[in-house]
Structure formats: structure tokens, C-alpha cells
Amino acid sequence: MDNSLNKYKTFLYQQLWETDLSICPRGKRWLIQTLRLLYVVAHDLTTGQLTLRAMGLVYTTLISLVPLLAVSFSVLKAFGVQGQIEPFLLEFLTPLGPKGKEIGTTIIGFIDNMNVGVLGAVGLGVLFYTVVSLVQKIEQTFNHIWQIGNSREFLRRVADYLSVLMIGPVMVVSALAMTASMVSSTFVQYLISIEPFGTMFYYLGLMIPYVLIIVAFAFMYIFIPNTSVKLGPALTGATVSGILWKTAGMLFASFAAGSTKYDAIYSSFAILIMFMIWLYLSWLIFLLGSQIAFYRQHPEHVRRSRGIIKLSSRQKEKLALMTMYWIGKRYYLGQKPWTLSALSTELGVPADLLSTMLDNLTSKGLIVEIMDKDIAYIPARDLDAITLHELINITRNADDGLIKGPLAQPEIEDVLAQLDQAYVSVLGDKTFRDWITQHNKAAEITRHA
């Protein structure tokens, strides 16, 4: 029985990872790609840091929730629509049942009692710092998911975060007000009275909460990471996480309704425990959607091996040459510099591997980072001043300091010296400008032939 089960698992595993997608029909290719995506997401969920980061965000949220809502409340108050914040909060807490309304009322009470005018400059600064810290923690988590090592600069971070905190609530309330105004219009009411438009509006009303959640999630998936996130992957992740969140809310409401025994055990702490559990599930689902968006945008990361990829010396040299060639070529042609995300997609190389190579080339003075919308890379020197032999030498000796071996042995050093001389004799003083120019001319000749 065990042998048959193992053979069946091996067969499915081979069908999933060893099938050549280029020769598969469209339907089968889509199915295999979806199953591969589900596999890596499930693996990350069970063995990765997603759960730990969701737990960390629960703690941060508990500290920052009231200041965050207070800032949003203050902005909405300036437009006279501060009463709209309570329905949003109660909607989020609906899965907690009657307890959710109690928590919501308590939080709203805290906000009402918070008088920004008497806080003073220091108190107001601490209030905004607490809010910015929450968004910064979320950004760091998203950057980890998207394998981005650099966060936004401080001034840009404050400007971006505060602009969303100021404009976001107003835009959401405005969108809801416009929707309510349209629904209450005479023409729309007349359409609703006619079938099948009435039935269509009924089902549309059921879909609106899902649509709003998906749009909100997609916006945050695009805005929060310090990289360019495409709309398609963001919508895919937002659709999955939005449906999961609404479904989890209904299931959690059933769980909360039958959890009266916890009141007897934990007394008044039961409300806080249920709230923390729901916060954790919400963050986990939210981060899961971002993970799906990442894999959709970077399918090269959807691979069977989930550990750290170890490159051979030859692969490191090849990756260094590829990286410098494409960065140098764009610089030579006067085109827009490569970003990590764009270059990773172009080369089909996982971003974590490419990021390590870019850091190495930057530290050795071959390329430099420039700040555009995202961090981009250009050669640190003129292409005539960078030789192929220099790049190969840097790549081969990148980890020389990691291992402290025995004293040099003449017979070994002699072999290594011969290898170095072989590189010099083959590459000579050939610069990157020579290399790029040679290949561009060859490409032009081929194109016109």
C-alpha cells in the first residue's frame, strides 16, 4: 500500500514539475501553472516567514490602531463625514458577532476622547510617528515578500504614507457616496422596478462588498512594496485574498457564535483574544494575496526547489556577464536604466540571486544605484574603463575572505596562476564598450541580411 502511494505521489510530482509547458495545450498549461503556484504558496505558508510576519503585524496593529483611526477621523472630520469611519470599523469586526460591536464602540470612544488640539507638538508628532511606523512595518513585510532589500527613503516614506492617510479615506467615502447617490436616483430606481434589471441589481449589490475589498487590496499591493507592481498580478492576488477574507469572515462568525465556553474560561479577556485571532487571520490572508501577486509577476520563482539556490562558479560568472552586459547595453544606447524587477524578468533569474550579484558589483565599483521611481542601475565608470577580465576576476574572487585556508602551496598556486593567465590571454584588454559594440554591429548585419 505504501509503495503504491509513493509511486502515485512520484507520478503526480513528475507531471507537475517535469512537464514541458511549451508543448502543452493552453488549458493544461494553465492548470499546471495554477497547481505549481498553489504548491509554492502552500509551501511558503507552512514553512516560510509569512505566519511570523502576520503575528508581528498583529502586535503593531494593536499599538497603532487607535492613532491610525484618529488620523483618518481627523481628515474626514474636516470634510464633515467623520461618521463614515464607524461603519468601516464595524464591517471589519462583523465576524466577531456581538463582541465585534462592543470592540468597535470602545475604539470609537477612544477616538472621540482623543483631542488632537491638546496633544501639543510633541504629542502630535508621536501620533503621526506611530501611524507611520505601522505603515513602515507593513512595507518591510511586503518588501520581504517581493524580495526587495531597500525601503523607501525617509522623506519619501513620510510623504507617501501621509498622502495616502490623508487622501485615502476621503476617496473611499467619496466613492461610496457616489455609489449611494447613483442607486438612489430616480432613473436607477425605475430600472430596478423592471425585470430582469431588478434581479441584476440585487446580485450586483451582493458583489459590491467583494469588489470594494478587491480594489482596496489591489491598490495596497501596488502602492506598498518599494517596487513596480503590475496591475494584473495585483488584481489576481487581491481577488484571491478578497474572496478568502470575506469567506473567512463568515466562517469566523460561526466560530465566534459558538465560542461561549471561552467566556467562561477567559472572562473579559475572551473579547481581546477573539479580536487578536481575527486580526491574525486578516493579516495572513492579506499577505497571502501579496505572495500570489509576487509569483504571478515573477513566475521564475515558481520552482520545485524552495531552498536557497547555490550557483556554481561558472554560473556566477555567467550571471555577472549577463548582468553587466544588459546594464551596459542600456547605458550605451541611452535607454532607461534597468531596475531589479525589470532585469530579473528579462533574464528569467530569481530576484534574490540577481540582488546579491547587483550588491556585489556595486560594492566593487562596477555599477551604481540611481533613484528614479525605483532604484535603477548604471555603470559606475565609462564602458571603456571596465574590462571583461576585471569583471571575471571580481566574480572569481568575490568570496576569497570567507575561508581562511592553510598557507599557500606552490603547486596549487602555480595551477591558479596558469588559469589567471589563460583568462588574460583570451580576454586581453577587451572593454565592455568593445563587447557591446561588436555584438550590436553583428545584430545589425544579421537584421539587414
Image (cartoon, helix red, strand yellow):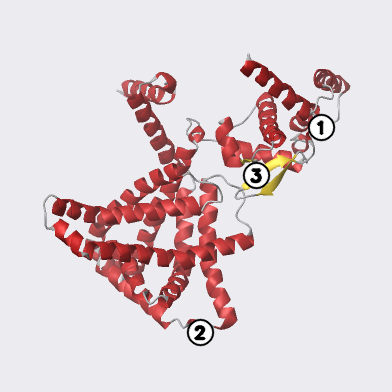
Q: Position of residue 104 (x, y in %)?
A: 33, 71
What residue did someone put label 2 on? 117
Q: Position of residue 383 (x, y in %)?
A: 78, 34
Q: Are marks 2 and 1 in contact (CB under 8 Å)?
A: no
> What numbered label is drawn on residue 384?
1
Query: Please, which residue is most extreme toward the right here?
Result: 410
Q: Amino acid at mark 1?
A: Asp
Q: Is residue 269 visible?
A: no
Q: Position of residue 431 (x, y in %)?
A: 80, 28
Which is nearer the eye, 125 or 162? 162
Dividing the picture into quarters, in which one does residue 394 lie?
top right
What residue did someone put label 3 on? 376
Q: Position of residue 134 (x, y in %)?
A: 51, 63
Which is nearer the eye, 262 or 60? 60
Q: Earlier in the sequence, mark 3 or mark 2?
A: 2
Dividing the picture into quarters, in which one does residue 408 lie?
top right
